[in-house]
Amino acid sequence: MSAELPSSLVLLGAGKMGQAMLSGWLRHGLEPSRITAIDPHLDQGGRALLFREGVPHVATPDGLASPEALVLAIKPQTLESAAPGVRSLIGKDTLVLSILAGKRIADISSRLGTLAGVVRAMPNTPAAVARGISAAVAAPGTTARQRAMANALLASIGRVEWIDDEALIDPVTAVSGSGPAYVFLLVEALADAGTKAGLPPDLAMRLARATIEGAGELLFRDAKTEASMLRRNVTSPGGTTAAALDVLMGNDELSALMERAVAAASRRARELAG
């Protein structure tokens, strides 16, 4: 086990993101016996994962000892009702790592009491395949040890970007936190367009999925090349790609649409605060 990983951890919320993070921690050597998951409403997938990996699961925090790290992975709207039950879990050296969209460090501290260390982060669902990216910001009182623990927990599910300004977490949420859904919608739209152009639906979907998978891998492997250059590399003057891009880029339609989408997601993240 990495020296930076916590010696004990409580995961509050074992939904899709909680499960993705848990899988990453286990892959990186955090022993199942050192983890306790709290979730009274586990879905079938979560229950199967915990059973398969041997991770203890309880419905409430009653009787649990203070862990070295407490990870908040519940729905933001449930923080108010969950806070009284987990407040007693927080010891003087407990790291609180929150992935709650919209919930500021001040919001978390006001509900959980005076905290020695808080890290607010926004991961995304590719964490499930260790290809996520998280942005994180630490409260002023967070120790070097706590920050290292948070970094190790987040790095086990992908890349980590540390920021100094907590206000940036809302646009981070809108870009990378919600971003996978935009990509999945693109796959749906591309496959649907292919079907309307005459392709069998199953073939159109296979082509769309494989295209996005391959383009993503190319972005990853050729990280030094700007996305705009990769786009130009595919685009022959007067060719088929250029004809399609004339539609997508005409009057900045796609850029303007994405700008509105990110603005809407950022606005909703701010509304979830407090």
Image (cartoon, rainbow, N blue to C red):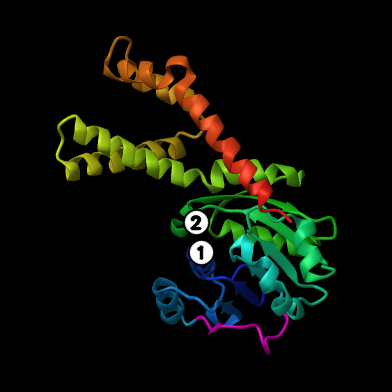
Q: Position of residue 146 (x, y in %)?
A: 75, 64
The question of residue 128 being in magenta is answered with: no
Taking the view exactly as shown, the residue that stands out farthest to the top is 238
Find residue 24 and name its label. 1
Can residue 38 be seen in the rendering of this structure?
Answer: yes
Q: Position of residue 164 (x, y in %)?
A: 77, 45
Which one is in front in this view, the residue at disc 2 or the one at disc 1?
Answer: 2
Does residue 215 appear left or right of residue 169 in this picture?
left
Q: Position of residue 201 (x, y in %)?
A: 18, 42
Secondary structure of the residue carrying numbered label 2: helix
205, 103: nearer the viewer: 103
Residue under the image location 53 percent in, 36 percent down:
261
Give the prevailing secondary structure in the magenta stretch: loop
Residue under the image location 81 percent in, 64 percent down:
110
Amino acid type, callout 2 = Ala
The question of residue 62 being in magenta is answered with: yes
Q: Which residue is mark 2?
A: 127
In this view, 137 is above or below 250: below
87, 95: nearer the viewer: 87
Residue under the image location 51 percent in, 80 percent down:
55
Asked whether the residues under the numbered discs 2 and 1 touch, taking CB atoms below 8 Å apart as contact, a structural biologist would say yes
- The stretch of residues the image draws in magenta is 55-67
